[in-house]
Protein backbone atom coordinates (compact mmCIF):
# COMPACT_ATOMS: atom_id res chain seq x y z
CA UNK A 1 0.00 0.00 0.00
CA UNK A 2 1.38 3.41 -0.91
CA UNK A 3 1.88 6.02 1.76
CA UNK A 4 -1.12 8.24 2.37
CA UNK A 5 -1.03 11.78 1.04
CA UNK A 6 -3.20 13.22 3.79
CA UNK A 7 -2.53 13.45 7.51
CA UNK A 8 -5.05 11.36 9.50
CA UNK A 9 -6.74 13.66 12.01
CA UNK A 10 -6.59 11.03 14.70
CA UNK A 11 -2.85 10.59 14.38
CA UNK A 12 -0.42 12.35 16.69
CA UNK A 13 3.33 12.32 16.32
CA UNK A 14 5.60 12.06 19.29
CA UNK A 15 8.95 13.79 19.07
CA UNK A 16 11.33 11.22 17.53
CA UNK A 17 13.85 9.35 19.60
CA UNK A 18 17.39 9.93 18.40
CA UNK A 19 20.01 7.22 18.11
CA UNK A 20 23.16 8.97 19.38
CA UNK A 21 25.95 8.50 16.86
CA UNK A 22 28.87 8.51 17.29
CA UNK A 23 29.26 7.29 20.90
CA UNK A 24 30.09 9.90 23.49
CA UNK A 25 33.48 8.23 24.00
CA UNK A 26 34.54 8.68 20.37
CA UNK A 27 38.23 9.58 20.15
CA UNK A 28 39.24 13.19 19.66
CA UNK A 29 40.52 13.99 16.17
CA UNK A 30 42.27 17.14 14.99
CA UNK A 31 42.18 16.65 11.22
CA UNK A 32 39.16 14.45 10.55
CA UNK A 33 35.65 15.86 10.78
CA UNK A 34 32.28 14.23 10.15
CA UNK A 35 33.27 13.41 6.55
CA UNK A 36 37.03 13.13 6.33
CA UNK A 37 39.49 16.03 6.15
CA UNK A 38 38.41 19.22 4.43
CA UNK A 39 39.67 22.77 4.01
CA UNK A 40 41.11 25.41 1.71
CA UNK A 41 43.50 23.72 -0.71
CA UNK A 42 47.20 24.45 -0.10
CA UNK A 43 46.57 25.63 3.44
CA UNK A 44 46.51 23.37 6.54
CA UNK A 45 45.04 20.83 6.77
CA UNK A 46 44.81 20.49 2.97
CA UNK A 47 48.51 20.86 2.12
CA UNK A 48 50.60 18.39 0.09
CA UNK A 49 52.79 17.85 3.16
CA UNK A 50 49.85 16.70 5.25
CA UNK A 51 48.45 14.66 2.34
CA UNK A 52 51.82 12.89 2.05
CA UNK A 53 51.65 11.93 5.73
CA UNK A 54 48.07 10.75 5.35
CA UNK A 55 49.17 8.49 2.48
CA UNK A 56 52.02 7.11 4.60
CA UNK A 57 49.70 6.40 7.52
CA UNK A 58 47.04 4.73 5.37
CA UNK A 59 49.63 2.42 3.82
CA UNK A 60 51.07 1.62 7.26
CA UNK A 61 47.63 0.74 8.64
CA UNK A 62 46.82 -1.33 5.55
CA UNK A 63 49.96 -3.43 6.06
CA UNK A 64 48.42 -4.84 9.22
CA UNK A 65 45.95 -6.83 7.10
CA UNK A 66 48.81 -8.90 5.69
CA UNK A 67 47.99 -7.98 2.08
CA UNK A 68 50.18 -6.23 -0.45
CA UNK A 69 48.96 -2.76 0.53
CA UNK A 70 46.99 -1.75 -2.55
CA UNK A 71 45.31 1.66 -2.36
CA UNK A 72 42.75 3.02 -4.82
CA UNK A 73 42.80 6.80 -5.32
CA UNK A 74 40.06 8.74 -7.09
CA UNK A 75 39.27 12.43 -7.24
CA UNK A 76 36.83 15.03 -8.49
CA UNK A 77 37.67 17.73 -11.03
CA UNK A 78 39.21 20.45 -8.82
CA UNK A 79 42.52 21.81 -10.06
CA UNK A 80 44.08 21.14 -6.64
CA UNK A 81 43.32 17.45 -7.07
CA UNK A 82 46.50 16.97 -9.09
CA UNK A 83 48.63 18.32 -6.25
CA UNK A 84 46.95 16.22 -3.55
CA UNK A 85 46.76 13.09 -5.69
CA UNK A 86 50.52 13.20 -6.25
CA UNK A 87 51.22 13.80 -2.56
CA UNK A 88 48.95 10.99 -1.36
CA UNK A 89 50.35 8.56 -3.92
CA UNK A 90 53.91 9.46 -2.92
CA UNK A 91 53.08 8.78 0.71
CA UNK A 92 51.63 5.36 -0.06
CA UNK A 93 54.59 4.46 -2.30
CA UNK A 94 57.09 5.60 0.34
CA UNK A 95 55.67 2.95 2.65
CA UNK A 96 55.90 0.23 0.02
CA UNK A 97 52.32 0.41 -1.15
CA UNK A 98 50.89 0.03 -4.63
CA UNK A 99 48.70 2.91 -5.81
CA UNK A 100 45.85 2.43 -8.28
CA UNK A 101 45.06 5.85 -9.78
CA UNK A 102 41.53 6.11 -11.14
CA UNK A 103 41.35 9.80 -12.07
CA UNK A 104 38.08 11.75 -11.81
CA UNK A 105 35.36 9.37 -10.62
CA UNK A 106 32.51 9.64 -8.06
CA UNK A 107 33.05 8.91 -4.38
CA UNK A 108 30.84 5.77 -4.57
CA UNK A 109 32.95 4.58 -7.51
CA UNK A 110 36.04 4.60 -5.29
CA UNK A 111 34.12 2.64 -2.68
CA UNK A 112 33.06 0.07 -5.29
CA UNK A 113 36.49 -0.24 -6.89
CA UNK A 114 38.16 -0.68 -3.50
CA UNK A 115 36.18 -3.84 -2.90
CA UNK A 116 36.04 -5.14 -6.48
CA UNK A 117 39.80 -4.75 -6.94
CA UNK A 118 40.49 -6.30 -3.52
CA UNK A 119 42.32 -3.18 -2.40
CA UNK A 120 43.23 -2.50 1.23
CA UNK A 121 41.95 1.09 1.21
CA UNK A 122 40.33 3.67 -1.01
CA UNK A 123 40.98 7.41 -0.96
CA UNK A 124 38.71 10.10 -2.41
CA UNK A 125 40.10 13.58 -3.06
CA UNK A 126 37.04 15.82 -3.01
CA UNK A 127 35.35 18.59 -1.06
CA UNK A 128 31.94 17.43 -2.28
CA UNK A 129 29.61 20.45 -2.66
CA UNK A 130 32.19 23.05 -1.56
CA UNK A 131 33.61 25.64 -4.02
CA UNK A 132 36.65 24.71 -6.11
CA UNK A 133 39.11 26.47 -3.79
CA UNK A 134 38.46 23.80 -1.14
CA UNK A 135 39.39 20.15 -1.21
CA UNK A 136 39.15 17.14 1.04
CA UNK A 137 40.26 13.58 1.73
CA UNK A 138 37.86 10.72 2.49
CA UNK A 139 39.03 7.20 3.25
CA UNK A 140 37.33 3.84 2.71
CA UNK A 141 38.37 0.55 4.26
CA UNK A 142 38.74 -2.74 2.33
CA UNK A 143 35.04 -3.42 2.89
CA UNK A 144 34.08 -0.24 1.00
CA UNK A 145 32.79 1.56 4.09
CA UNK A 146 34.16 4.83 5.45
CA UNK A 147 36.63 4.39 8.27
CA UNK A 148 35.22 4.56 11.81
CA UNK A 149 36.33 7.32 14.16
CA UNK A 150 38.81 5.03 15.93
CA UNK A 151 40.75 4.26 12.75
CA UNK A 152 40.83 7.92 11.75
CA UNK A 153 42.24 8.72 15.19
CA UNK A 154 44.84 5.97 14.69
CA UNK A 155 45.91 7.57 11.39
CA UNK A 156 46.34 10.93 13.12
CA UNK A 157 48.41 9.32 15.87
CA UNK A 158 50.73 7.71 13.33
CA UNK A 159 51.18 11.04 11.57
CA UNK A 160 52.32 12.65 14.84
CA UNK A 161 54.38 10.05 16.71
CA UNK A 162 57.30 9.72 14.29
CA UNK A 163 56.90 5.98 13.72
CA UNK A 164 56.23 6.39 9.99
CA UNK A 165 59.66 7.94 9.34
CA UNK A 166 61.32 4.99 11.08
CA UNK A 167 59.55 2.34 9.01
CA UNK A 168 60.06 3.45 5.41
CA UNK A 169 61.47 0.72 3.13
CA UNK A 170 64.24 1.18 0.60
CA UNK A 171 65.34 -0.56 -2.60
CA UNK A 172 62.83 -3.12 -3.81
CA UNK A 173 60.58 -2.24 -0.90
CA UNK A 174 59.55 1.12 -2.35
CA UNK A 175 56.09 1.04 -3.89
CA UNK A 176 54.76 2.16 -7.28
CA UNK A 177 51.73 3.81 -8.83
CA UNK A 178 49.79 2.91 -11.96
CA UNK A 179 46.75 4.16 -13.81
CA UNK A 180 43.62 2.00 -13.80
CA UNK A 181 42.34 1.94 -17.36
CA UNK A 182 38.58 2.29 -17.78
CA UNK A 183 37.93 2.81 -14.05
CA UNK A 184 34.86 4.82 -14.98
CA UNK A 185 33.66 2.07 -17.32
CA UNK A 186 33.84 -0.51 -14.54
CA UNK A 187 31.71 1.72 -12.33
CA UNK A 188 29.19 2.35 -15.13
CA UNK A 189 28.73 -1.41 -15.60
CA UNK A 190 28.23 -1.88 -11.87
CA UNK A 191 25.70 0.95 -11.53
CA UNK A 192 23.66 -0.22 -14.52
CA UNK A 193 23.38 -3.58 -12.76
CA UNK A 194 21.45 -1.95 -9.90
CA UNK A 195 18.57 -1.12 -12.27
CA UNK A 196 15.97 -3.92 -12.66
CA UNK A 197 16.86 -6.14 -15.61
CA UNK A 198 13.25 -6.37 -16.75
CA UNK A 199 13.01 -2.59 -17.24
CA UNK A 200 14.55 -0.06 -19.61
CA UNK A 201 14.55 3.71 -19.79
CA UNK A 202 13.54 3.71 -23.45
CA UNK A 203 11.60 6.86 -24.25
CA UNK A 204 12.24 8.49 -20.86
CA UNK A 205 13.79 11.95 -21.16
CA UNK A 206 16.21 12.63 -18.28
CA UNK A 207 18.05 15.88 -17.61
CA UNK A 208 21.32 15.13 -15.81
CA UNK A 209 23.39 17.89 -14.20
CA UNK A 210 26.80 16.52 -13.17
CA UNK A 211 27.94 19.78 -11.51
CA UNK A 212 31.12 19.85 -13.64
CA UNK A 213 32.30 17.32 -11.09
CA UNK A 214 33.42 13.74 -10.70
CA UNK A 215 30.45 12.22 -12.56
CA UNK A 216 30.70 14.41 -15.67
CA UNK A 217 31.45 11.37 -17.84
CA UNK A 218 29.85 8.45 -16.06
CA UNK A 219 26.44 9.92 -15.15
CA UNK A 220 25.19 10.70 -18.70
CA UNK A 221 26.64 7.37 -19.86
CA UNK A 222 24.69 5.32 -17.29
CA UNK A 223 21.31 6.80 -18.18
CA UNK A 224 22.01 6.76 -21.91
CA UNK A 225 23.10 3.11 -21.97
CA UNK A 226 19.90 2.15 -20.15
CA UNK A 227 17.94 3.71 -22.99
CA UNK A 228 17.11 7.20 -21.70
CA UNK A 229 17.00 10.30 -23.86
CA UNK A 230 19.66 12.24 -21.92
CA UNK A 231 20.08 16.01 -21.79
CA UNK A 232 23.47 16.54 -20.11
CA UNK A 233 24.43 19.64 -18.13
CA UNK A 234 27.52 20.43 -16.06
CA UNK A 235 29.76 18.14 -18.10
CA UNK A 236 32.54 20.56 -19.08
CA UNK A 237 34.83 20.82 -16.03
CA UNK A 238 37.82 23.14 -16.18
CA UNK A 239 39.15 22.63 -12.66
CA UNK A 240 37.48 25.77 -11.34
CA UNK A 241 33.79 25.48 -12.24
CA UNK A 242 32.82 22.49 -10.07
CA UNK A 243 29.49 23.23 -8.31
CA UNK A 244 29.50 26.77 -9.76
CA UNK A 245 25.91 27.72 -10.63
CA UNK A 246 25.12 24.07 -11.33
CA UNK A 247 24.52 20.69 -9.74
CA UNK A 248 22.70 19.86 -6.52
CA UNK A 249 23.50 23.26 -5.00
CA UNK A 250 22.00 25.17 -7.92
CA UNK A 251 19.22 23.12 -9.55
CA UNK A 252 17.60 26.20 -11.10
CA UNK A 253 19.17 25.73 -14.53
CA UNK A 254 18.27 22.05 -14.56
CA UNK A 255 14.70 22.92 -13.61
CA UNK A 256 14.39 25.30 -16.56
CA UNK A 257 15.74 22.69 -18.95
CA UNK A 258 13.34 20.04 -17.59
CA UNK A 259 10.42 22.35 -18.34
CA UNK A 260 11.80 23.43 -21.69
CA UNK A 261 12.57 19.89 -22.89
CA UNK A 262 9.44 18.40 -21.26
CA UNK A 263 11.59 15.85 -19.46
CA UNK A 264 10.22 13.25 -17.04
CA UNK A 265 12.80 14.02 -14.39
CA UNK A 266 15.84 16.17 -13.61
CA UNK A 267 18.75 14.71 -11.65
CA UNK A 268 21.32 17.11 -10.16
CA UNK A 269 24.42 15.63 -8.52
CA UNK A 270 26.96 17.31 -6.26
CA UNK A 271 30.69 17.55 -6.95
CA UNK A 272 31.52 13.98 -5.96
CA UNK A 273 28.11 12.50 -6.92
CA UNK A 274 27.32 10.89 -3.57
CA UNK A 275 24.06 12.82 -3.29
CA UNK A 276 21.39 14.24 -5.55
CA UNK A 277 18.55 16.68 -5.85
CA UNK A 278 15.64 15.73 -8.11
CA UNK A 279 12.95 17.80 -9.82
CA UNK A 280 9.77 16.33 -11.25
CA UNK A 281 8.26 16.97 -14.67
CA UNK A 282 6.62 20.13 -13.32
CA UNK A 283 9.91 21.54 -12.08
CA UNK A 284 9.19 20.98 -8.38
CA UNK A 285 12.01 19.75 -6.12
CA UNK A 286 11.71 16.22 -4.74
CA UNK A 287 14.12 15.98 -1.81
CA UNK A 288 15.71 13.05 -0.04
CA UNK A 289 12.86 12.60 2.44
CA UNK A 290 10.28 12.14 -0.29
CA UNK A 291 12.52 9.80 -2.28
CA UNK A 292 13.08 7.68 0.84
CA UNK A 293 9.33 7.57 1.54
CA UNK A 294 8.67 6.45 -2.04
CA UNK A 295 11.35 3.78 -2.11
CA UNK A 296 10.67 2.51 1.41
CA UNK A 297 6.99 1.85 0.66
CA UNK A 298 7.87 -0.23 -2.43
CA UNK A 299 10.66 -2.09 -0.66
CA UNK A 300 8.31 -2.92 2.22
CA UNK A 301 5.77 -4.25 -0.24
CA UNK A 302 8.41 -6.51 -1.83
CA UNK A 303 9.75 -7.64 1.53
CA UNK A 304 13.09 -5.88 0.95
CA UNK A 305 12.84 -3.27 3.73
CA UNK A 306 14.78 -5.28 6.29
CA UNK A 307 13.66 -4.77 9.86
CA UNK A 308 10.62 -2.87 8.58
CA UNK A 309 12.54 0.35 9.17
CA UNK A 310 14.04 3.33 7.40
CA UNK A 311 17.09 5.13 8.87
CA UNK A 312 17.27 8.93 8.61
CA UNK A 313 18.77 11.81 10.57
CA UNK A 314 17.24 14.22 13.05
CA UNK A 315 16.89 16.71 10.18
CA UNK A 316 14.35 14.64 8.24
CA UNK A 317 10.87 16.11 8.15
CA UNK A 318 8.28 14.96 10.65
CA UNK A 319 6.08 14.08 7.68
CA UNK A 320 8.47 11.26 6.81
CA UNK A 321 7.84 9.67 10.19
CA UNK A 322 4.09 9.88 9.61
CA UNK A 323 4.47 8.33 6.16
CA UNK A 324 6.40 5.40 7.62
CA UNK A 325 3.75 4.85 10.29
CA UNK A 326 1.01 4.86 7.67
CA UNK A 327 2.56 1.86 5.91
CA UNK A 328 3.44 0.00 9.10
CA UNK A 329 7.16 0.83 9.10
CA UNK A 330 9.45 2.62 11.55
CA UNK A 331 11.70 5.64 11.20
CA UNK A 332 14.99 5.38 13.09
CA UNK A 333 16.86 8.66 13.53
CA UNK A 334 20.59 9.33 13.90
CA UNK A 335 22.80 12.36 14.30
CA UNK A 336 23.49 14.42 11.19
CA UNK A 337 25.96 12.82 8.77
CA UNK A 338 25.61 10.01 6.26
CA UNK A 339 28.36 8.02 8.01
CA UNK A 340 26.16 7.78 11.13
CA UNK A 341 23.22 6.67 9.02
CA UNK A 342 25.36 3.91 7.51
CA UNK A 343 26.70 2.84 10.92
CA UNK A 344 23.15 2.50 12.26
CA UNK A 345 22.06 0.60 9.15
CA UNK A 346 24.91 -1.86 9.47
CA UNK A 347 24.38 -2.34 13.21
CA UNK A 348 20.66 -3.04 12.78
CA UNK A 349 20.78 -4.83 9.43
CA UNK A 350 18.63 -2.20 7.68
CA UNK A 351 18.53 -1.79 3.90
CA UNK A 352 17.56 1.84 3.28
CA UNK A 353 18.64 5.11 4.84
CA UNK A 354 19.68 8.63 4.04
CA UNK A 355 19.42 12.34 4.58
CA UNK A 356 16.97 15.01 3.54
CA UNK A 357 19.84 16.64 1.64
CA UNK A 358 19.98 13.76 -0.84
CA UNK A 359 22.58 11.38 0.59
CA UNK A 360 20.70 8.12 0.01
CA UNK A 361 22.08 4.70 0.88
CA UNK A 362 20.68 1.53 -0.65
CA UNK A 363 22.80 -0.93 1.27
CA UNK A 364 21.92 -3.84 -1.03
CA UNK A 365 23.61 -1.94 -3.87
CA UNK A 366 26.24 0.36 -2.34
CA UNK A 367 28.23 0.94 0.84
CA UNK A 368 27.89 4.71 0.74
CA UNK A 369 25.60 7.38 -0.67
CA UNK A 370 25.34 7.18 -4.47
CA UNK A 371 23.34 9.81 -6.37
CA UNK A 372 23.17 7.80 -9.60
CA UNK A 373 22.06 4.58 -7.89
CA UNK A 374 19.38 6.51 -5.98
CA UNK A 375 18.10 8.15 -9.18
CA UNK A 376 17.83 4.75 -10.85
CA UNK A 377 15.78 3.33 -7.97
CA UNK A 378 13.39 6.24 -8.32
CA UNK A 379 13.20 5.88 -12.10
CA UNK A 380 12.44 2.18 -11.72
CA UNK A 381 9.32 3.05 -9.70
CA UNK A 382 8.23 5.61 -12.30
CA UNK A 383 8.72 3.18 -15.20
CA UNK A 384 7.18 0.16 -13.49
CA UNK A 385 4.08 2.03 -12.33
CA UNK A 386 3.84 4.32 -15.36
CA UNK A 387 3.07 7.33 -13.20
CA UNK A 388 4.65 10.80 -13.32
CA UNK A 389 7.03 11.72 -10.52
CA UNK A 390 4.85 14.60 -9.34
CA UNK A 391 1.98 12.20 -8.66
CA UNK A 392 4.22 9.65 -6.94
CA UNK A 393 5.83 12.30 -4.75
CA UNK A 394 2.51 13.81 -3.74
CA UNK A 395 1.24 10.43 -2.58
CA UNK A 396 4.45 9.46 -0.78
CA UNK A 397 4.29 11.88 2.14
CA UNK A 398 2.83 15.16 3.36
CA UNK A 399 5.56 17.57 4.39
CA UNK A 400 5.12 19.60 7.56
CA UNK A 401 6.35 23.19 7.41
CA UNK A 402 10.00 23.34 8.51
CA UNK A 403 12.02 26.46 9.31
CA UNK A 404 15.82 26.49 9.55
CA UNK A 405 17.84 29.34 11.05
CA UNK A 406 21.57 29.63 11.72
CA UNK A 407 23.63 32.01 13.85
CA UNK A 408 27.42 32.20 13.72
CA UNK A 409 29.31 33.06 16.90
CA UNK A 410 32.99 33.52 17.65
CA UNK A 411 33.10 30.37 19.74
CA UNK A 412 30.91 27.50 20.90
CA UNK A 413 29.22 27.09 24.23
CA UNK A 414 27.54 23.89 25.44
CA UNK A 415 23.82 24.06 24.69
CA UNK A 416 22.93 22.93 28.20
CA UNK A 417 24.74 25.99 29.60
CA UNK A 418 22.66 28.42 27.52
CA UNK A 419 19.91 29.01 30.08
CA UNK A 420 17.76 31.56 28.25
CA UNK A 421 17.70 29.45 25.12
CA UNK A 422 16.95 26.27 27.07
CA UNK A 423 13.97 27.92 28.77
CA UNK A 424 12.69 29.19 25.43
CA UNK A 425 12.98 25.75 23.86
CA UNK A 426 11.11 24.10 26.74
CA UNK A 427 8.32 26.67 26.51
CA UNK A 428 7.94 26.32 22.75
CA UNK A 429 8.02 22.52 22.91
CA UNK A 430 5.08 22.70 25.29
CA UNK A 431 3.29 25.06 22.88
CA UNK A 432 3.80 22.73 19.89
CA UNK A 433 2.94 19.57 21.81
CA UNK A 434 2.95 16.40 19.73
CA UNK A 435 2.37 18.26 16.46
CA UNK A 436 5.84 19.75 16.14
CA UNK A 437 9.41 19.67 17.34
CA UNK A 438 12.42 21.86 18.01
CA UNK A 439 15.99 20.83 17.24
CA UNK A 440 18.99 22.98 18.21
CA UNK A 441 22.55 21.85 17.54
CA UNK A 442 26.00 23.18 16.78
CA UNK A 443 27.40 22.65 13.30
CA UNK A 444 30.02 19.94 13.07
CA UNK A 445 32.44 22.15 11.11
CA UNK A 446 32.06 25.73 12.40
CA UNK A 447 30.84 27.69 15.47
CA UNK A 448 27.37 28.01 13.99
CA UNK A 449 24.24 27.27 15.98
CA UNK A 450 21.52 25.66 13.86
CA UNK A 451 17.87 25.97 14.87
CA UNK A 452 15.17 23.86 13.26
CA UNK A 453 11.46 24.09 14.10
CA UNK A 454 8.63 22.05 12.59
CA UNK A 455 4.89 22.38 13.03
CA UNK A 456 1.57 22.79 11.23
CA UNK A 457 1.65 26.63 11.12
CA UNK A 458 4.60 28.08 9.18
CA UNK A 459 4.14 31.58 10.60
CA UNK A 460 4.13 30.26 14.13
CA UNK A 461 7.23 28.09 13.75
CA UNK A 462 9.16 30.92 12.04
CA UNK A 463 8.43 33.15 15.02
CA UNK A 464 9.54 30.37 17.36
CA UNK A 465 12.81 29.85 15.48
CA UNK A 466 13.62 33.57 15.55
CA UNK A 467 12.78 33.80 19.25
CA UNK A 468 15.14 30.90 20.02
CA UNK A 469 17.88 32.62 18.01
CA UNK A 470 17.38 35.82 20.03
CA UNK A 471 17.59 33.86 23.28
CA UNK A 472 20.80 32.24 22.06
CA UNK A 473 22.32 35.65 21.27
CA UNK A 474 21.42 36.87 24.76
CA UNK A 475 23.12 33.82 26.27
CA UNK A 476 26.28 34.32 24.23
CA UNK A 477 26.47 38.02 25.06
CA UNK A 478 25.86 37.54 28.76
Image (tube, rainbow, N blue to C red):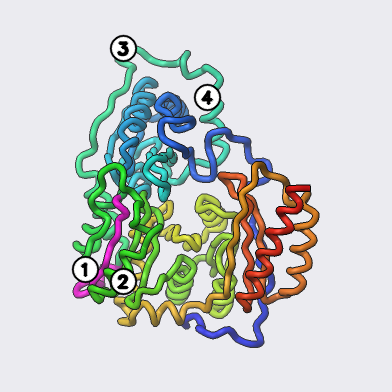
Q: Which residue is mark 2?
A: 265
In front of the other: 359 or 197 = 359
Asked if residue 140 is positioned above or below residue 420 in the image, the reply reads above
Residue 9 appears anywhere in the view: yes
Residue 233 on image: x %, y %: 25, 59
Q: Are marks 3 and 4 in contact (CB under 8 Å)?
A: no
Kindly identify which numbered label has been placed on residue 158: 4
76 inside magenta stretch: no
Asked if residue 94 is positioned above or below residue 103 in the image, the reply reads above
- Determine which quarter of the picture holds residue 114: top left
Residue 101 on image: x %, y %: 28, 35
In front of the other: 378 or 257 = 257
The disc, 4 or 1, on the residue closer to the chain's N-terminal end is: 4
Question: Which mark lies nearer to you, 2 or 4?
Answer: 2
Residue 474 on image: x %, y %: 75, 53
The disc, 2 or 4, on the residue closer to the chain's N-terminal end is: 4
Q: Which residue is mark 3?
A: 171
Crowding near the residue tagged with mark 1, few <14, some 14–19, many ≥20 C-alpha atoms within 10 Å: some
Q: Are marks 4 and 1 in contact (CB under 8 Å)?
A: no
Residue 392 on image: x %, y %: 40, 79
Give the side of residue 280 with respect to residue 474, left or right: left
Question: Which mark lies nearer to you, 3 or 1?
Answer: 1
Crowding near the residue tagged with mark 2, few <14, some 14–19, many ≥20 C-alpha atoms within 10 Å: many
What range is drawn magenta here?
196-212
Secondary structure found at label 3: helix
What's the CA distance linking mark 3 and mark 1? 52 Å
The disc, 1 or 2, on the residue closer to the chain's N-terminal end is: 1
What's the CA distance linking mark 3 and mark 4? 23 Å
Q: Which residue is mark 1?
A: 228
Residue 64 appears anywhere in the view: no
Residue, x 38% and y 30% (percent of image)? 67
Amino acid sequence: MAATSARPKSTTIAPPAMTPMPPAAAPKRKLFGTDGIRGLANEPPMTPEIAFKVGCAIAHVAKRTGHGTRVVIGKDTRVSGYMLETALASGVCSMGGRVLLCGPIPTPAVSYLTTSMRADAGIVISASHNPFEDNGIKIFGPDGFKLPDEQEADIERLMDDGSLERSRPTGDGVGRAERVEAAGGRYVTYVKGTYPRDLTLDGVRVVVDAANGAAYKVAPTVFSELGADVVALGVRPNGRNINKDCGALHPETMREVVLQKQAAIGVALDGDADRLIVVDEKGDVVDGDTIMALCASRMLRRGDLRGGALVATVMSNLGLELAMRSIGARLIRTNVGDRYVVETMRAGGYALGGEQSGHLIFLDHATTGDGIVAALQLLAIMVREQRPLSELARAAMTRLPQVLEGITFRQRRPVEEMERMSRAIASFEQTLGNDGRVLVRWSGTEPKLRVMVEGPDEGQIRSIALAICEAARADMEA
